[in-house]
Image: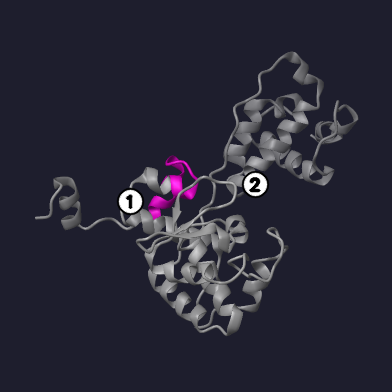
Amino acid sequence: MGPHLRACADVGRRQRRPLPYRVERLLTATTRLAVWCHRSGLPDDPEVWLRHETIDAFVLTGCTDLAPSSAQTYRSWLRHMRATLAWLERGEQAPPPMKAPKKVSPPYSPAQLGRLRGWAERLPGQARGDGLALMALAFGCGLTSGEVAAVQTRHLRRLDCGAVVVTVPGTERLIVCRAAWEDVLAHAADQPGDRFVFRPGHTARHAKNLFSSWTARHTPTGGLPALSVRRLRSSWIVELLSARIDLGVVAAAAGMSASALARYHRFVPALDEQTTVALLRGRAC
């Protein structure tokens, strides 16, 4: 099997365009493929190994120890390797894309969120405002890290009813802060001048280590997990879904498709029988 493996690994001599990956990584994927093919009883022939159907079978059954995204990366490497060979000139159609499921950051529990807010409220000076602003924008409004970093006081608008609307730069989404966090953003909106809501001292929207440097200096006590924009946003989505708010409304506010929300449903608690009956009946018993 050695000569055939070397033939695959030495593909660089025959390629029509450079591969965008390091040789060591390609050798790792190729070696695993070759071993899998040999154990599967396939001919010791690189042409057989690099067929589209062989690569897909290898990824699906021979890479079960890898994370879905890593297995997808192996497939991409092997497909690029095949694309550099003359075999592509046979007119084979490109295989359909194989997508790895996106990971969803688990939400905080309601108890953790309550304790995290209490911890943030006890921070000294500007750290208190930053911690509460981070939670208000990510958990109160469901913003992504890039959106949290971009929001300035001029993007906040208060309605007559007391609600706070956030206009995210570059989007047309209607984002209304959850009532429990309105006071935090209302206070930020009342500050003089136009400045960033989270860490108003920074001057660039894409400041390096904007979140990591802050969370590294401010670690929650009492066994609480660190503040994470992704987890706060997940908590916001799960809270809205748990309240049985229309999926279209949640998706539009989150800037997602309604189908993408399905990944969060496993965190949504089931309704009790009384609530279920009332919803199906259209009136409480």
Residue ID at (40%, 49%): 250
Instruction: Give the answer, above or below, for where 120 lies relative to 79.
Output: below
Instruction: Give the answer, above or below, for where 1 lies relative to 186.
Output: above
Residue ID at (62%, 72%): 215
Total number of numbered labels? Answer: 2
Asked if the residues shown at circle 2 and circle 1 are in contact, with their CB atoms under 8 angstroms apart, the answer is: no
Mark 2: which secondary structure?
helix
The reply, left or right, for residue 228 in relation to residue 257 is right
Q: Position of residue 175 (x, y in %)?
A: 46, 53
Q: Earlier in the sequence, mark 2 or mark 1?
A: 2
Task: Give the residue pinned by disc 1.
Answer: 245
> Where, quadrant-wise, is the C terminus in this rendering?
bottom left
User: How many other residues sit within 10 Å of disc 1, few (<14), some (14-19) or many (≥20)?
Assistant: few
Q: Position of residue 259 (x, y in %)?
A: 43, 40
The amino acid sitting under disc 1 is Ile
Q: Position of residue 1 (x, y in %)?
A: 79, 34
Front one among 186 and 138: 186
Front one among 179 and 264: 179
Magenta-drawn segment? 252-266
Q: Which mark is residue 70?
A: 2
Q: Name the main secondary structure of what is drawn in magenta.
A: helix
Mark 1: which secondary structure?
loop
Q: Position of residue 15 (x, y in %)?
A: 86, 28
The amino acid sitting under disc 2 is Ser
Instruction: Give the answer, above or below, for where 244 lies relative to 182.
Output: above
Indicate whether residue 258 is drawn in magenta: yes
Instruction: Give the answer, above or below, for where 96 lies relative to 255.
Output: above
The reply, left or right, for residue 263 in relation to residue 273 is right
Mark 2 to mark 1 CA distance (whole Å)? 35 Å
Q: Residue lying at the far right in this picture: please name it.
A: 13
